[in-house]
Amino acid sequence: MPKQKTAKIRIERQGGHYSDINGILKGEWGGYEELYEKGPSGESQYEIYYNRYSRRITINEYGYFYNLFSCQKYDAVLMLNPNYFICEKNNRLGIINKDGKEILHVVYKDITSHKPFSDKIQLFVVTTETGKFLYNLLNNTKSEVYNNIFFNYDEAFYGCHNLNGVVYQVGDKYGLMDLDGQILLKPIYCYNDFERRLCYEFQGTRFPVSVKNGLLYGKIPINEYDLCFKIGHEIMAEFYITQIKSKYGILNWKGECVAKPVFDEIILYKEKYWAEVFRTAYSNARGEWIDTLFVICKKNRRYSLFNLQDGKCIISGCEKMQYEKGSWLYVKYEKHNKTGYVTFAGIIVSNEDYESITKTSYNYIVSKGGLFGALNGEGFEIAPCIYDTIKCNDHGELIANKGGKDIVLNPIPKSVSDSYDEDYDYERPTYGRYAGSYAQDEMGWSDDDIDTVLDGDPDAYWNID
């Protein structure tokens, strides 16, 4: 600031705003306050409220913003940090340094910043006549001009606001670039305004897409696939769909490849309005750990079923396949024009093993050689095929008939029967009282089977024709 100055600004309230009645400082200001601290030469200093950025800025009595920049040259100056400033002239904006050098010429319609201002990251969205570009002041880099640009925050919906990239818009699609304006993801996505993040729309559901540490979801190389997006929100109950050209593949929750991109279609399990992940995980009565997460894939009009938890294909070459849900999620299929099931435990119940299969609310009634047996919901045998008929009553009990005598294969306690729920997980049979017998160890008969059918004598199994 020159040492000799006579003209001074005089800011007074004018209606609903403040202005300089001496006409040195242009514009209308939202607030005014004289500061107790004097300038370096003893001059008076004021804080005025810069409406455009909703920030207070400093000006001295001679009209110098921050004792550096004359209001004769700029209509307003906003400090970003002690080294850089946004400046305005005739409603156009630019960026200058503390020495007055123009970093961005004062020609732009608007400049908005990634907040808060800091010395480490200085990111700006700059509006031109044709669109917007990203400017990184720290690295002095610019992006191409796009229709629109948003700052993208990781997991913003859950309260965490870590900037992990910048969203750019081309037409009605969106992509992601890094903080220097280099393209990370092509513009093939949609944008969730509420969560402020990229999403990919697949089969009517939007799935969030993010980049962490240069990797998709922090796990998958960005350029390995044409497309990759995550299904699900919980660890070990999520997976990834990949795409190369028009073919789809699957990665498990760890990011490991379960199926390469060779499928024409990935069919997701859907609730009423959106696709969802349904994982079944528990320890069963046999002490086995059951963990299934089913995904149906289609190729050349044939269906395959994968369990993503162990990475194995359960069955393939099916003409039809669909998810079914009761208490648990299971799969119904047709292969060689015969109906079969994959239980929620991942066990195949097939017409290759049984002449007929009837699904009840929880169990399976099966037949061999004209006689009937039953499997539980997991697919384990609870009654061998030795009965003339088996029917399921209104309470979910399996009523078997042999030689005119009815036997309840899975009696339900009265307290449960009185308040019957079709999703009731029936008590599983016990195995142990007849351990070591052929009937139990080899044929899988439960203690109740041997008690009911063989009158407690496992050796009587050999008398069954």
Image (cartoon, rainbow, N blue to C red):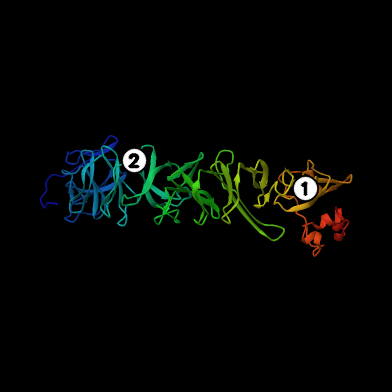
Residue 399 seen: yes
Front-most of residues 232 and 108: 232
Q: Which residue is mark 1?
A: 368
Task: Give the percent coordinates (x, y) of residue 81.
Answer: 27, 54
Q: Is residue 242 left or right of residue 89?
A: right
Residue 51 seen: no
Q: Which residue is mark 2?
A: 148
Front-most of residues 412 and 193: 412
Give the quadrant of residue 174.
top left
Amino acid at circle 1 = Lys
The outermost residue toward the left is 4
Give the quadrant of residue 91.
top left
Residues at marks 1 and 2, CA–CA distance in whole angstroms: 67 Å
Q: Give the mark nearest the N terminus, 1 or 2.
A: 2
Task: Give the percent coordinates (x, y) of residue 213.
Answer: 40, 57
**Helix, strand or loop at disc 1?**
strand
Front-most of residues 266 and 77: 266
Task: Give the percent coordinates (x, y) of residue 300.
Answer: 53, 42
**Helix, strand or loop at disc 2?**
strand
Nearer the viewer's eye, disc 1 or disc 2? 1
Q: Is residue 182 left or right of residue 193?
A: left
Amino acid at circle 2 = Asn
State whether residue 247 is above or below residue 119.
above
The outermost residue toward the bottom is 436
Label 2: how many Cα within 10 Å (few below 14, some 14–19, many 20+): some
Task: Give the percent coordinates (x, y) of residue 170.
Answer: 35, 40
